[in-house]
Image (cartoon, helix red, strand yellow):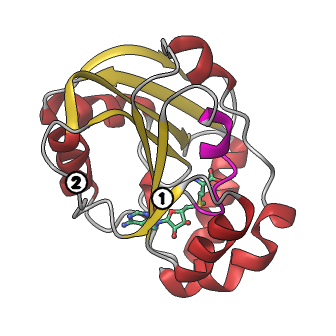
C-alpha cells in the first residue's frame, strides 16, 4: 500500500480531484479549539481546511513521500508516520477525527475504527468521507484499485454505519445522495 502512495505522492494533487470538506464543516461545530486528527492524510490538503477551525491539526500517514509533501506545504500541521490500526495517542485525547477517502485502504478496518474510538474524547466526533461502491464512479474506482492491486475494501453507507455502531459510535449525520462519495458523522 505504501508503495502505491509513495509513487503517487509527487503527482497526487494534480492527479486526484481536490475534495472540499463542505459537509463536514457544515455539520460539525468547531469553535477554534481542540485537536483534530486526520487519519490517512495524504498530502495534507484536506486537513489544511481545518487549520483555522481548531487549535491543532495532526495527521497520521504511513507513506513517507506523502509525509514529505505535508511537511513542505503545511509546516504548521504535525504530520506523524503511522497507521490507523495503531494510533500513537493516549486514550481520550483527541476532539475530532476525520478520514477522507482513506478508510477503504486500511488493512484492518475494524481495528482502525476501534483505535479512533479509543483516542477520541467522550462526545468527540468522527467524520468520514468514503467512496460509495454502488455508484457508477464508485464502481469504476473499485475496479481501478483492484487492477492496481491496492487491496481496497469498500463499504456501502449502511455497512459502514453498522460497523460504527458495532464499535460504539452514535451516528449523528449521514448523507449518501451525492455520487461517488458519502459521509458519516458519529459521536463517541
Ligand atoms: C486516497 S489517499 C487520501 C488522502 C487524503 N485524505 C485526501 O483526501 O486527500 C489515502 C491515504 O490513506 C493512507 N493510508 C493507507 N493505509 C492506511 C492505514 N492503514 N492507516 C492510515 N492511513 C493509511 C495512504 O497512504 C494515503 O495517503
Quadrant of the image containing the C terminus? top left
Identify the element where label 2 is drawn: loop
Mark identifier at residue 97: none
Say if the magenta span includes residue 49. yes
State which tag comes first along the sequence, 1 or 2.
1
State the residue at coordinates (20%, 43%): 119
Q: Residues within 10 Å of mark 1 (few under 14, many from 20)?
A: many
Q: Nearer the viewer, mark 1 or mark 2?
A: 2
Q: Which mark is residue 89?
A: 2
Q: Which residue is mark 1?
A: 40
Residue 90 shows in this picture: yes
Mark 2 closeness class: few <14, some 14–19, many ≥20 residues within 10 Å: few
Q: CA distance from mark 1 to mark 2?
A: 15 Å
Camera-nearest residue between 111 and 161: 111
> As rendered, which of 148 and 18 lies closer to the eye?
18
The stretch in magenta equals: 42-50
Left or right: where 117 falls relative to 54: left
Q: Is residue 151 magenta?
A: no
Q: Residue 64 location in percent, x, y?
A: 53, 81
Where residue 103 sits in the image (x, y, percent)? 43, 52
Amino acid at each position: 500500500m505504501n508503495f502505491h502512495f509513495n509513487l503517487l505522492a509527487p503527482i497526487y494533487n494534480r492527479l486526484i480531484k481536490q475534495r472540499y470538506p463542505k459537509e463536514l464543516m457544515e455539520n460539525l461545530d468547531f469553535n477554534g479549539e481542540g485537536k483534530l486528527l486526520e487519519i490517512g492524510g495524504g498530502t495534507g490538503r484536506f486537513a489544511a481546511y481545518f487549520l483555522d477551525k481548531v487549535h491543532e491539526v495532526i495527521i497520521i500517514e504511513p507513506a513517507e513521500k506523502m509525509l514529505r509533501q505535508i511537511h513542505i506545504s503545511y509546516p504548521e500541521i504535525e504530520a506523524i508516520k503511522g497507521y490507523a490500526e495503531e494510533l500513537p495517542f493516549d486514550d481520550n485525547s483527541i476532539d475530532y477525527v476525520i478520514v477522507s477517502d482513506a478508510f477503504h485502504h486500511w488493512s484492518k478496518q475494524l481495528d482502525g475504527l476501534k483505535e479512533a474510538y479509543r483516542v477520541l474524547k467522550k462526545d468527540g466526533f468522527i467524520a468520514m468521507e468514503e467512496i460509495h461502491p454502488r455508484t457508477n464512479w464508485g464502481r469504476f474506482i473499485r475496479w481501478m484499485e483492484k487492477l492496481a492491486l491496492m487491496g481496497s475494501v469498500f463499504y456501502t453507507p449502511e455497512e459502514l454505519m453498522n460497523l460504527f455502531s458495532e464499535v460504539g459510535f452514535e451516528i449523528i449525520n449521514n448523507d449518501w445522495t451525492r455520487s461517488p462519495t458519502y459521509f458519516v458523522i458519529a459521536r463517541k
